[in-house]
Structures are given as structure tokens and as C-alpha cells.
Image: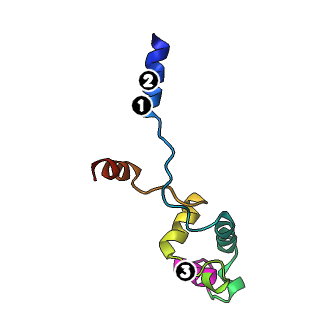
Amino acid sequence: MEFLIFELYRKLLSDYARTGQPPTYTDEQIIRILEIACRTPEEYGYEASHWSLNQLVDVVIKEGIAESISAKTINRFLKYGENPPASRPLLAAFLRKNG
């Protein structure tokens, strides 16, 4: 009986795979962005000891890694090291169910 209850809870609490929006940036692009961030701005012609997000955006576009990218997206890559998770997954799920 305990096993059945456990299985019921597991099924109720498990998250089903969703299609969602595909990632905008490939893993290769993210790795290249992180590689740039690990270098010094001087290597790319900037007179600064630390990167600003706007400088990283400029270099990513100039290097042809992405046609366009926001500073916020680069910040998320630096924080998570990958395509960021949904910022409000519970809210998104609620809105999908309740329209």
C-alpha cells in the first residue's frame, strides 16, 4: 500500500517534459562567449581591467558569435554557464493552465 501511495505522489509531483521554445544560442556560442569573458578586455582593444556587459556584447557581435545579443543574456550565461532556466516556471505553468 505504501508503495502505491509513494508512486501516486511521485507521479503527481513529477514534471513532464515540455517542448517550449528552443534555445536561442547554441552550446558552442555560449562557450565562445564564456571564453571571451575569461580573457582581459585589453586583448580586444579596450582600456579596462574588467569587462562591462556592454563591452562583452560589442565583442560577441564583432567576433561574429551572434548577430545580436543583450547584456542581460550575457549576464545570465555568466551566472548559469548555459541557457538560463525559465525565470518564472511556476507562473508560466499556472498561466498555461488558466489562460
Q: Nearer the viewer, residue 11 or 40?
A: 11
Residue visible at 43% across and 23% down in the picture: 8
Question: Which residues fall within the magenta stretch?
Answer: 48-60
Q: Residues within 10 Å of mark 1 (few under 14, many from 20)?
A: few
Q: Say the numbered circle drawn on residue 12.
A: 1
In this rendering, the answer to whether 57 lies above or below 83 is below
- Percent across and percent down for residue 64 are 66, 82
Q: Nearer the viewer, residue 95 or 76?
A: 95
Q: Nearer the viewer, mark 3 or mark 2?
A: 2
Marks 3 and 2, how far apart at CA: 46 Å
Residue visible at 67% across and 89% down in the picture: 45
Circles 1 and 2, Cβ within 8 Å, touching? The answer is yes
* Name of the residue lying farthest toward the top: 1
Type of amino acid under label 2: Leu
Q: Say the numbered circle drawn on residue 8.
A: 2
Circles 1 and 3, Cβ within 8 Å, touching? The answer is no
- Percent across and percent down for residue 58 are 58, 84
From the image, give the main secondary structure of the stretch colored magenta: helix
Residue at the disc numbered 3: 68
Marks 1 and 3, how far apart at CA: 41 Å
- Percent across and percent down for residue 99 are 28, 53
Type of amino acid under label 1: Leu
